[in-house]
Each structure stands twice: as structure tokens, then as C-alpha cells.
Amino acid sequence: MKKILLASVVNAALGFTLTPIAAMAQSSITLYGLIDEGLNYTSNTGGHSNVQMESGFAQGSRWGLKGSEDLGGGTKAIFQLENGFDVNTGKLGQGGRMFGRQAYVGLSSAQFGTLTMGRQYDSVVDYLAPLTANGNWAGYMLSHPYDNDNTDNSFRLNNSVKYTSNTYGGVTFGGLYGFSNQAGGFANNRSYSFGAQYVGAAVSVAAAYMQINNPGGTAGGSLSTDDTDFFASRQQVWGAGINYTIGPTVLGFVYSHTTLNNATGSVYVGNFANTANSLKFDNFEVNAKYQFMKAAYVGAMYNYTLAHFDSNAGNSKPKYHQFGLMVDYTLSPRTDAYVQGMYQHASSGGLVAMPLNTAYITGADAPSSGPNQFLARVGIRHTF
């Protein structure tokens, strides 16, 4: 029905007759979306508590179009255009882009895999993130500090070509290359990543690597200024993880490492007082999800992050302890309600541009005035 309606709208807008897409057995277009809305309470944001209405925490609010055309011989032309937006204001997300979440076109082969081109997810998001709490069942609030490893998909990569294999005995692998699009600067703000995963009956294992040269250094490069979380001469992320299923329970462990060379600033913590020779994050996460009834689950996560800030002005090694919890109840096949909570404790010195021992949960509107911060949310999510 949606496909026929979409074709009718196009016909009326263009002033001529098109064959309804639903009648074409070899082609399809799907309109889809998700709306996530809720209320947040933050215990300490700049020395004050705060209550806010916020959109897109369990999952980013979005709508999109995706489709395929059968070219014969097991090959299809495919595309996806996905928009992100803020429910409370109606504003576009991802720096005001019309299709900021995804925008690509490509070919899919039953024999050789899938090759796509456009604005896309990197291999860390594709392979490693699904084993974390935030990249699977919990979302934005339970991500690692500053989403330093991009497992919550804070940014996408532009000008990218991506290959994804078919699944062979439970194994899938792939890689991505993002062009700088700069004359005389082929390597300036380019990116590449690769990863693999194995999904079995009880065990899922994945590993991924990503490197970006001069992230945010050019407006038209692979990672533009309004996308990046950090500014540096080079950003590297790698990690591995495992999930193990025991009946209704899924247990997980993920390790990820992020290195930023010659870091000059961050959209989260402001400009550093001195350029960092290196800024590193080591993230250790354990998580568990228990489906205690068909319509409801509870999930919990603990993450320990050790950061290393090395500059000419001195060194700092802030530590972050994070405890996250989520309870979700399905109201219908397309609607669920949930409650989330996140507590962070920072110790042993904050980053140079921040006061020492300052907590800052991803999703809070500002850092705490002290070492502790708590963020709670009640939300509803609807898909269509």
C-alpha cells in the first residue's frame, strides 16, 4: 500500500503517469522511519540539575527511502537515503544535511557481495558496534566517553566506497575507503576502515579498524568539520568484542582503543590549552541483556575508560567509570516504552581544557561541576 501511494504522489507531482512500483515484481522502494522522544533528568550540569525534552537517544529519529532493482543474474541496483531530525524542533540533524544519516547507491550480487558509494557507516559501526550496549540495545546515553571510538555512530564518512561480503559459514567481512576530494592533497582528510564478524548459534565475534587522516581538516573531505568529534592530524580506532547467548541472556565484552595524534580540539571539551602530542582512550566494556518476558528486556553495562593526554605542558590520565541500565517494554509490534539511567565517575585528572575530575556523560547538555554525573531518561519509540 505504501509503495502504491508513493508512486501516486510522484505521478501527481511530475504530471505524467508512472507504473506503480508495487506492480513491478523486479523493483521495490520502501519508505520507513523511527521517532524516539522522551524526558531527560541530569543531576549536575554546570552545577545545576536540569530536566529536558530530548529526541533520539535509544535510536536517532529518522525517515528514509531504500530500494532495489533486479538487473538479472543475481545482481541488483540498490540505494538508500536516510534523514536524521530532532522531533522537538523539526530541525535537520547531522549538521543540517537533508540525508545526513546515509546516502548511497550501488550494486548487490548474490555471488560477489555488495559495493556502494556515497555517505556511509565505517567498519567499526558495521562490525564492532553491534556487540556494545550503545551500538545494539541501549543507544546514545550508554556510549563510551565522548563516543571516542564511534561505536554510537557519531559521524559518517563522505565520498566513500564500501564493500560488504556475503555471509560464508557465519562470517561477513568488508571495508571502506573515503576520498579526500582535494587536488594536491590526496591523503588529506581521507579515511579507510575494515572489519569482520562471525555470528553463530550462541557466539558472535567481531573486530574492526579505522583510520582518518586529518579528520575535519577540510570541508569537502571524508570527515567534515561539522561531523567530527575530535580534530587531529590522525585518528585511529580499533577493537574487538564477543557476545555469548545463554537462553534469554546475552553477555558481552568489548575492548576498543582510540589514538589521536597532534590533537588540537574537540567539539565536546572545547579547545585544548595546548596541542596534544597524543590523546588516547582505552575502553573496556562488559554488558548483559536479559529478555525476562516476550515483550520486555532489561540491559546493564559497565565501562571503564582510561585516557592518556600527552602534551608539552604535561601529562594527564583521567579515568572514567560508567554504569548504565535500560528497561524496555514493547507496547505493540511498532511501539515501545523504555527507561534508561547512566552514572559516570571521573577521577585522576580531567582533560587539560576542563577542571580536574569532571564527569561528562554523552548526551548531557554540559559537563558536571564535579567528578560525578547521573542522567536518567523516560522515552517512547515508534517505527513505521
Image: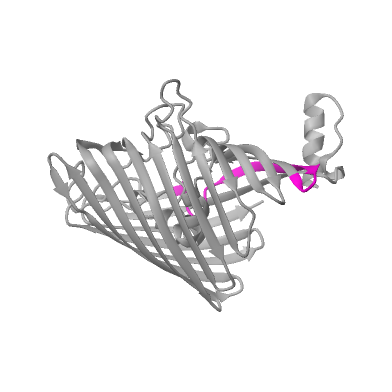
On screen, residue 129 above or below 153: below
Residue 261: percent from left, percent from top = 28, 40
Q: Which residue is at the front of the view, 12 or 191? A: 191
On screen, residue 340 above or below 47: below
Q: Quadrant of residue 270?
A: top left
Q: Residue at x 48, y 60 (%)?
A: 206
Q: Is residue 249 magenta?
A: no
Judged left or right of residue 141, residue 2 is right
Count of marks, rendered view = 0
Find the residue positioned furthest to the top. Answer: 183
On screen, residue 252 above or below 111: below
Residue 301: percent from left, percent from top = 40, 66
- The prevailing secondary structure element of the residues shown in magenta is strand
Find the residue positioned furthest to the left. Answer: 313
Range shown magenta: 53-75
The colouring scheme, among rainbow, by chain, secondary structure or one colour, is one colour
Residue 165: percent from left, percent from top = 61, 51
Q: Which residue is at the front of the view, 21 or 71? A: 71
Residue 45 visible in the snapshot:
no
Residue 234: percent from left, percent from top = 34, 38
Q: Which residue is at the front of the view, 254 or 49? A: 254
On screen, residue 348 above or below 183: below
Residue 62 visible in the snapshot:
yes
Q: Residue at x 75, y 45 (%)?
A: 75
Q: Quadrant of residue 278?
A: top left
